[in-house]
Amino acid sequence: MSLMWRILRYYRPFAGRILVAFVLLIAATLLNLLKPWPLKFVVDSILPAPQGGIHFPWGDGVWSFPAALSLTCGLLVGIHLLWGAVNLAQTYTLIEVGLQALLRVRTELYAYLQSLPLRFHDGRRSSDSSFRVAYDAQAVQTYFNRGFATILGSVLTLGGTFFVMWRMSPLLALLSLGVVPLLMMAILRYAGRIRKETAALQAQESDVLARASEGLSSIRVVHAFGRESHEVDLFRREARESLEANLRLSMTNVASTLVVGTLLALGTAALLWAGAGEVMAGRMTLGDLLVFLAYLGMLYSPLEQLSYTAWSMEGAAAAAQRVFEVLDTPDEVPDPQTPTRLPAGPGAIEFQGVGFRYARGDEVLQGLTFRIQPGESVAVVGGTGAGKTTLLSLLPRFYDPTEGSISIHGVDLRKLAKQDLRSRQALVLQETILLSGTVADNIAYGRLGASRREIETAAQEAQAHEFILALPNGYQTQVGERGVMLSGGQRQRIGIARAFLRDAPILLLDEPTSALDATTERELLDVLGKLMSRPTTLLVTHRLHAAHRADRILVLEKGRLVEEGKGEELLTKKGAYWRLWQATNG
């Protein structure tokens, strides 16, 4: 029940349109109940009087055979056309409402995925999250359009049809319901199986998407090692498991359809046998029997729809559970209810007894205490696994420390809204991530709405302007997925231009030159030196000649701060920094 109400929450803004659709549904149901009566009039009143003299129930006139037949056939077509128009209007309204609700849940789900901390995304595949947004979210529409709307329409049709059938023959009306208990038993038996098998299929389909996404995104590595056939074998294995899950669900659906169809056929046969006896006994006319059989079809059709609807809702429920599983995930790096505004301008950054451990329990940082003055540039160095990148990730609140606190302007980061905090920071990563779009779009990602002049100025400061102009379409050149159309050095320059354009008071650099050759690195270090001269800067690097450019160096070993000072001073101490220098330059 809670799942149903959670889904209905997305339909609250559309209550007015749903009410209109409900009124149209009632009108369509009434028109549908009129459909068999022209046939009864033809059989009972027109065909027995081929010479004419036919009276219509609503008038006193006498009609000839051709005129009465033509009018009745026209009335039959008119009822169908009017029913079709009303049904079209209510169907369109319900589908449009369902799609609007789908838009709401997809947007909410995607927005929540964007807001969840990296700890959540570290533990799952991005393709699985994408599958939930693109496919599982459709359950909200399915649950309403194939569930609630179908149930409502079926109940109205059942009620109206049974009322008319009861007025015509209580005995036959009761007989027509004889298969209903058996039908309900079949629905309950197959419902659980369908939900379980649908959930299994969706999980397998997510695995197929993950395998395809991983194989195609790593196509260079695949080709480089000649592992095309290996990747195809892995994909075939996932696809086969999906096939088997799909086949199991399909066979369950076929079996359930066969059972339902057989039960309804038994009910129809029983009614036909009893109805024929009523006609032979003179208690019903042939027209009455034809109308009754038509109503029986109207009675059994929604019963059949209800059985399929129950199974569709079970499948939709399995998908909806996957959506709400994400939405129910607690945000481990939440915004405060009443966030503090960060003062303008540069401010001191202070670490007080900061420790951090990942979910698996590994302690990465221990007891870090240091202060970075406004406008100071600080480099963080250490061996592999020393915790350098983790330390940097705490400043934008990608993670929160598990011990101690970090403050800017004397304000604990946990008291700041993440959007406010991150708007004061610029980040350059080891490998700049570019989004599909133009070069100008990717530079402007640092400050949306920047003018063309501002974009070009930032590119010039990053020494990227000349190579951008040499591209086929200059700043409007498409960079391809993840920037594959550009070299590593070009991508880094665009990332640095993005940071120049952002012009934030805090600059975070995570191994910005480690993936570059020596010549490109020397060129970019000059650019980075210019960039670092403006804001408060924290540089994470294992390139010690780059660290030497900073005002101060912090040396980490196994998550602990073991040394700090200027590069030349640390070398004279012949401690941890000197050992790193010897290992790097020895």
Image (spheres, rainbow, N blue to C red):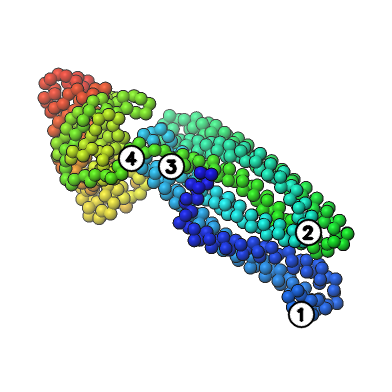
Q: Quadrant of residue 161?
A: bottom right
Which residue is identified by label 4?
A: 334
Q: CA distance from mark 2 to mark 4?
A: 66 Å
Identify the mark nearer the N-term, 3 or 1. 1
Question: Can I make out residue 206 in this image?
Answer: yes
Residue nearest the observer in this picture, 180 or 463:
180
Question: Is label 3 or label 1 in front?
Answer: 1
Residue nearest the observer in this picture, 161 or 230:
161
- Asked if 97 appears above or below 512 in the picture, the reply is below
Question: Is label 1 or label 2 in front?
Answer: 2
Q: Amino acid at mark 2?
A: Ser
Give the residue at x 62% y 37%.
193
The x and y percentages for residue 509 are 24, 36
Give the residue at x 88% y 59%.
280
Identify the mark nearer the N-term, 1 or 2. 1
Q: Are marks 4 and 3 in contact (CB under 8 Å)?
A: no
The circle on residue 327 is 3
Q: Are marks 3 and 1 in contact (CB under 8 Å)?
A: no
Question: Can I make out residue 532 in this image?
Answer: no
The x and y percentages for residue 220 are 41, 35
Which residue is identified by label 1?
A: 60
Q: CA distance from mark 4 to mark 1?
A: 78 Å
